[in-house]
Image: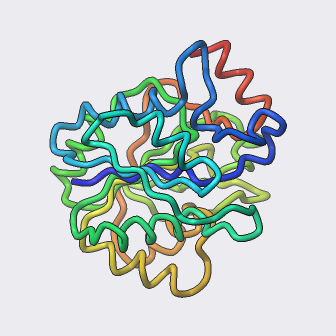
Amino acid sequence: MKAIVLAAGFATRLYPSTLNKSKSLLKVNNKLVIDYIIEKIQKIKNIDEIILVTNNNFYQDFLNWKKDREILTILNDGVSKLEDKLGAIGDLLFAINKRGINDNLLVISGDNLFDYSLEEPYEVFRREGKDLSLFYDTGNFEEAKRFGVALIENNFLVNFEEKPQNPKSTFCSSSTYFFKKSTIPLIKEFASKGLADQPGLFLQYLYKKVPIFAYVTQGKWLDIGTKESFEKAQREF
């Protein structure tokens, strides 16, 4: 299995903190956000490579952070301006093509903070033999409007909407996915349609094509995409 960390965003909602720094390289209580994520990923024993995709502006910063860790590969998607961004699925496809990947995938957003293990959902992924997406129950319909929202029946995804005005549940995507290698052609197919920005839009497309196991996490989860959530992370992590 390969892990792909998507960290090529410009994080404009966190300006000025992210004018010259990736939000994945910001510190939460003296520890880099990316280090929280990598530590969780490395506990999955079958992952033999962690590929992080960043943009041209932050590429050298990530190389400096990587140091001599051989399991890590840093890819530069070549983008220097916000208006030229490839989007999350575009960057995912870039990594797949650049590394010639034909393996199962763990795909995770580089701005996630969470305290639960990835080992258990990985074991469920192996046991079920189905694509798997992690969800977090916000317990708040108003808050759910900010995320991709799932309807779940018998542990499988039966509906998914990206940032709905009227959420059908409070189960929100945590931007963490386990994909079988047989799903890679569907990633390529979706990207060819020019809808390559939000990974939630791919999930909205994918659940109509293949069964997706919906794993509801137990524990804390935060998307640090806003100043408010970043400040909350400093208090809770």
Q: Is residue 174 in view from this perspective?
A: no
Here the colouring is rainbow
Q: Position of residue 10 (x, y in %)?
A: 70, 51
For this orientation, the residue located farthest to the right is 16
Q: Position of residue 218 (x, y in %)?
A: 43, 28
Q: Nearer the viewer, residue 98 or 185?
A: 98
Query: Residue at coordinates 54% horizontally, 37% vertically from top-left?
Result: 112
Asked if 63 appears above or below 179 in the picture, the reply is above
162 horizontally vs 110: left or right? right
41 horizontally vs 56: left or right? left
124 horizontally vs 189: left or right? left
Quarter holding residue 196: bottom right
Asked if 116 appears above or below 71 in the picture, the reply is above
Q: Is residue 184 in view from this perspective?
A: yes
Quadrant in which the N terminus is drawn: bottom left
Query: Residue at coordinates 37% horizontally, 33% vertically from top-left?
Result: 67
Asked if 177 appears above or below 185 in the picture, the reply is above
Asked if 94 appears above or below 47 in the picture, the reply is below
Q: Position of residue 116 (x, y in %)?
A: 40, 27
Q: Position of residue 139 (x, y in %)?
A: 64, 33
Query: Residue at coordinates 17% horizontally, 51% vertically from top-left?
Result: 126
Q: Nearer the viewer, residue 22 or 131?
A: 22
Quadrant in which the C terminus is drawn: top right
How many numbered callouts?
A: 0
Q: Nearer the viewer, residue 167 or 130?
A: 130
